[in-house]
Every structure is written in structure tokens, then in C-alpha cells.
Image: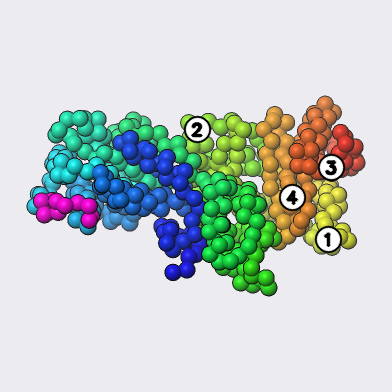
Amino acid sequence: MKKRFNVTGTCRPAEHYMMDDTRRFNAIMDLVERGEYFVINRPRQYGKTTMLAALRNELRRREDYLPVFMSFQGLDSSVYKSDITFGQYFYGELVDALQYSEEFDKKAQVAELPVPQTMKELSNSITTIVRMTPKKLVLLIDEVDASSNYEPFLVLLGMLRTKFLNRDQPEHATFHSVVLAGVHDIKSLKFKLRNPDDAQYNSPWNIAADFKVVMEFYPNEIAHMLKEYSQAEGVQMDIEAMSERLYYYTSGYPFLVSKLCKIIAEEILPQKQDKSRWTMDDLEAAVQLLLKEDNTNFDSLIKNLENNKELYDMVCRVLIDGELIPFNPDAALTRLGRMYGIFKEVQGGVAIHNRIYEQRIYAYLIVRRIEEKQPETVNYVGSQFIKDDGSLDMCQVLRKFQAFMKEQYSKRDESFKEREWRLVFLSYLKPIINGRGYDFKEVETSEEKRMDIVVTYLQWRYIIELKRWSGEKSHKRGLDQLANYLDIHGVNEGWLLIFDDRHNPTWKEELIQHKGKEIFAVWV
């Protein structure tokens, strides 16, 4: 069977091109071997189901282990009618898993066991089953947060916790390890309780080991997949450079990496005259196609912003305002953003997880602004911005933006805050580079609240700093910062856009030579 890139469901090594999962798998397998109970809580399409399948297969190969797999996805609400109905469902899934297991040789004895009528009886049944085999039973449950709104699930977890704490006693023999997989960590779930007064932060799963495994893939792990594809398909590429660039755009988010590869292999390559090579231009084209695509991953991303105004505001503070928000894993919004795959930690601050998400959220914010503010349309797109060599005339872009802002200046009011002018500029820039480039926000962690935008246009790159006017001393520091940033990127030319909200703004432009760099500055 010919392999392909997979972005839906479980990845199988015999059918799909897969990144090197050795590091992740070994770290999780180590937790299982130590007898830990834990939750693989990561965003959707992060490879959790694939990981559980790999664990199940590996444990089956080992003589001293017996894996039991089940999923809580798509359960009928009647299952949660009472503690015992859910307990009986769980018991039925446990028995079915054992009956279909080639490694379990006590099928007849299990079939004769009575169906438990209470949670106490369910606990006893688990002990009986565990004692039937010398193997270590490992319980694997996928989509565990599908049960998050039902109290019986809490009761089950509480029973398993009690058995775990007393597992040295014969009457409490229990699973060697329990692995739960879902988007949510158990302690972050909001449960639908019959008696809300019973709600408490103390989780019934407080026995769980901390899950600190990095589930994103690194460039060398991405390269493993590209090498296998290249050899199998006879397609040439610079594997190291391609892997680094895929990581640059995705930060190793499994779905995004595989999706970009799938687009190149199945949509872009068949249309090329030279079908024997992947190029960086192919990857750039794939990014453009992905950003225009509707898929369940992006749907979930935007839905999570729309359903939580506080999270939406925090994303705007990070992405548009350029605000430094210290990273605190215990802060509720930071934790929520990480859980949904929106945030990550960068140099001690909160940042958008990857550049694909950044662009998608940015496009969403622009649409929101148009819908809410109904701004004047900007019709400055055209050949006036393109130089003879095909590059972008960024000085002309900033001049035209200044003219636009000056024309609209009389319509400003006190509500026109810093976020507004930043978003206006980003909205203005979008149609100019649309289809030929990107504008990535590189938020700087400084009290100056500056925000660097790295614009790529075809093969050219432009670095623009957005900054609010705060006086000459701050301006001098800003020039130093921009010069240093240009130096880091190995370029000698940069642009500075200054928002001057004084009562008498200067509306000027200036070509500045600073620390060997040429900086074109515009005040708006």
C-alpha cells in the first residue's frame, strides 16, 4: 500500500508518513513503566490517539503487560444517568476489551462474573480481574473529556484513586497504570453536578503525575518523515532546510506540519512541471493555501476565541498591542490558552503558539474590526507599491498609510487607542501583500511595548517596528533596539512607524542613519 500524509484519525506506520515519535513515546512509556496515573492533555489533532495506539501495540508485544483500551467519545447521555449506569458501561467496556485480547487467557472466567450493581462491586470486580492474570494491566482511555459534564465520571475517578492509594492491599489490587487522553486536564474540567455545592478544586485525580512531555515535534523529528517520503517517492528536497522552515511556521504542531506536507504532495506537486523536487517556494505556496482553507482545526481555534471574551482580549493584547504578559502556568487564561494550543512560553512571556495561528487569528481580528467598526476602505493596492525589480516599496507603503491616517485624523476620538492604530495598519497592509507574502508579528518583551513586524514578499524581507511616541529618549532607545534587531536578522535597512497621539502630531517622515543601519521613519 502506498503511504500518504495523514491529518485525520490515527496515524499508522504502515499507511502513513510519520514524524519520528521516539522521544515522545519513550517519555510516556517511562511513565507507564513506573506505574503512574496521568493525563495526556493537549489540543485536538496533537497525536494523542496515535500515541495511545502506539502504547497499546507496544504493551501487547511485551509479555508482562496487558493493555485495555476504551474511548468515551460519542457516548449516549443515558450512560450518565447514575453512578452505576456509568460504572456498568465502564465494566462492559473493560470486559469486552479483555474478551478481544489475545494476551488474556481467562475469558471464560471473566464472562461468568456478575455485572456489578454498585461502585463498591465494580471496585471488587476490578480487583478480581487484576488478580486473574500475572500481567500488569494498563488502562488507556481516549477522549476522556467527553465525560467532563457528568458527575458519575467523577465517582469513577474517585474509586480508581482510592484503589491506587491502597493498591498494596490485596482487596484493592488495581491497574498498574492508567493513561487518560483528552484536550482538558482533569482538574481544569467544569463538571455538571447534581449538587453544585459539591464542586471543589480538589480533583478526584490528584494522584496523577505531572505530564511534562513536549508533544510538539522538533525539526530533526520532522526530517525523519521527509526523508522517508523522499526515498519512497523519489522526490528530492533539502530535507534539513525544509524541516527547519516547517518548524518555523508551525512550531512543531503535528497537524499543521502534516497538513502542509499533504498540501505540497497532493495539491502543489501534481501541478508542477518538475515533479521530482520540493522547493521552498512550494512550502510558501502551501502556507498560503492552508491559510485560506476551512478546516476543523481552524474552526476550533476561532470558536475558542469567540466563546471566551477574556481569552480573546488577551490574544489581542499579545498579538496586536505587543504587550508583555509574564508567563504563569497557573494563571487561568494562560492555562486556557495553552490547553487550546493558542499560547506558548517565549523568553518568560506569553506568545502565540505558531505563525500559522498568528496569521489566521490576525485575519479573524481584521474581519471582526470591519464588522464592528466599519472603517473606510483603503484602495491603495496596485503597481505604485512595486519597484522595477518586483520588490515592495515599503517607504511608499508607509507614506500612503500616513496620508490615509491624516485624511481620517479628524474622525479620531478618545476611543482610538493604541490597539486600534496597530490593527488599522495591519488591516491596511494585508491586501498589499496578500497572496505574495506574510506579515509576522515578532513581539518584543520590553516595557516599550514595541512590536516588530517581519514582512516577507516573494523572496524579499522587510522589518517594520511599530511604536508609540513617548519622547526623544524613548525614540533613541527604539532606534537602538531596531538597529540591534536588524543586525540579528542580517539586514541593513528597516522601517519605523510611530503613532503620535499628541494633540499636534508632526505627520513627518525621516531617513535616519543609526549604528550602520538605514531606518525610514514615519509619524502618524
Q: Which residue does the numbered mark 1 point to in the structure image?
A: 390
Closer to us: 267 or 23: 23
Residue 105: percent from the left, percent from the top? Answer: 16, 52
Closer to us: 177 or 468: 177
Residue at the image point whose x is 57% and y is 52% from the top: 223
Q: Nearer the viewer, mark 1 or mark 3?
A: 3
Question: If the image is split into quadrants, where does the C terminus sit?
Answer: top right
For the residue carrying disc 4, how many other residues have a C-alpha within 10 Å: few (<14), some (14-19), or many (20+)? Answer: many
Classify mark 2: helix, strand or loop. Answer: loop
Residue bounds of the magenta highlight: 101-110
Residue type pointed to by label 3: Asn
Q: Which residue does the numbered mark 2 point to in the structure image?
A: 329
Residue at the image point whose x is 41% and y is 59% from the top: 12
Real-space CA distance between mark 1 and mark 4, rounded to the nearest whole angstrom: 15 Å
| Quadrant of res 451 | top right
Classify mark 4: helix, strand or loop. Answer: strand
Give the residue at the far top of this rendering.
473
Residue at the image point whose x is 64% and y is 33% from the top: 324
Real-space CA distance between mark 4 and mark 3, rounded to the nearest whole angstrom: 15 Å
